[in-house]
Amino acid sequence: MTSIKVNAEKEYLVHLDSNWRDAVESLAGSHNKTLLMVPTELVDLFQMQALAKANLRIVEIPKGESAKSPEFLLKMWEVCGEFGLKRSDCIIGIGGGSATDLAGFVAASWLRGISWHAIPTSLAGMVDAAIGGKTGINSSHGKNLIGAFHSPTSVVIDQEFLNSLSERDFNAGMAEVIKCGFISDQKILELALDAKSNIKELISRSIAVKAQVVSADFKEGRLREILNYGHTLGHAIEKIEEYKLRHGEAVAIGLVFAAELSNIAGGLNAAAVVLHRELLEKFDLPTSYRPEALPKLLELMAGDKKSRGTIVRFIGLEEIAKPIWLESVTSDQIAQAYGRISG
Ligand code: GLY
């Protein structure tokens, strides 16, 4: 079994080629108590109840973003208290990005921080959400506004979960994989041409990109912002669409916009912009958005966590695998780039 090391506020391993069931049993065997948080539909699909025992409690959580609410967090703290979870115990989060974000934040906040392990089941979770220690829930004011940096103690990747994903979810995850290719590892872009055959290498290369970035800048001083390539517009679109689009679908539109803006304001060549469209469309991902949405998108982008005052900052590319910070783009340049994705 191979693994990738992340060296953030602590060191931990992302175990590739793992068997999730063995991992859960081994963690439960080495802790006094283990709380396993998992979306209901996965409990049934993977017959997880069979794993429950006196020291391993399974808590079913709602699917998707609805798990990441203050109300559900309160419920989870009740479960932790009632189960008697101590500092030496652990939480395991199994599921997509929402499940691991929530499990991580419960672990970060309970007893001022206990150990947790992430077992991502979606492609986006494997290559992005479960790695890097960003944990949190949503506020009525926006997504992920309440949270903490709290690294997992390990991440367990079992590709068996990918077989249960819909084509749409797999494709949405590919947006994050492709993003890793554009910001850091051009080989990913080649491998993505035959993603199903190359999935193992695509996952490990994308994790390596993320591991390297979060090891250098855990708390997002600056470098970590490159992981948000395509996300400034993507997050705004997600909000307008009331989170009915998959995160990766909104990011796909944001990636093409960021590439166009990079062409206008950062010197990225036109062929690289074409490559963005070609690769994302290969996975049936959207690459354009409604022209009339620009004013609302601008308003939402100005409120983005990464904006400074009212200045909207974008991550762009100077060339493939060479990210740049576009910190003083004009509204004309934004409108021009947006025109190219909404024509
Ligand atoms: N998903 C972006 C990050 O972890 O920083």
Image (cartoon, helix red, strand yellow):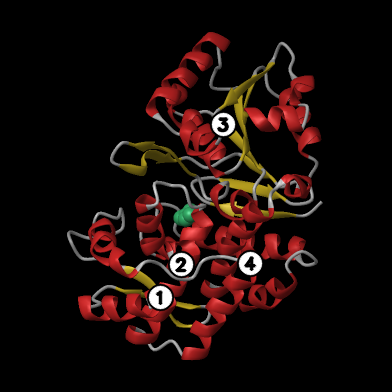
* On screen, residue 250 above or below 314: above
Q: Nearer the viewer, mark 2 or mark 3?
A: 2
Kind of residue at badge 3:
Ser
Which comes before the other along the chain, label 2 or label 1? 2
* On screen, residue 147 above or below 286: above
Real-space CA distance between mark 2 and mark 1, rounded to the nearest whole angstrom: 8 Å
Q: Secondary structure at mark 2?
A: helix
Instruction: State if disc 1 and disc 2 touch (CB < 8 Å).
Output: yes
Real-space CA distance between mark 2 and mark 3, rounded to the nearest whole angstrom: 36 Å
* Residue 199 image offset from top left, x and y in percent: 74, 62
Q: Which residue is mark 3?
A: 115
Q: Which residue is mark 1?
A: 341
* Residue 343 image offset from top left, x and y in percent: 38, 78
Q: Give the residue drawn at x 38%, y 58%.
A: 237
In the displayed structure image, the side of residue 266 where residue 206 appears, left or right: right
Q: Give the residue drawn at x 44%, y 70%.
A: 288
Which comes before the other along the chain, label 4 or label 1? 4
User: Furthest-left residue in view?
Assistant: 309
Q: Secondary structure at mark 3?
A: strand
In the displayed structure image, the side of residue 22 where residue 213 appears, left or right: left
Instruction: State if disc 1 and disc 3 touch (CB < 8 Å).
Output: no
Q: Which residue is mark 2?
A: 253
Q: Quadrant of residue 204?
A: bottom right
Q: Is mark 3 within 8 Å of ligand 1?
A: no
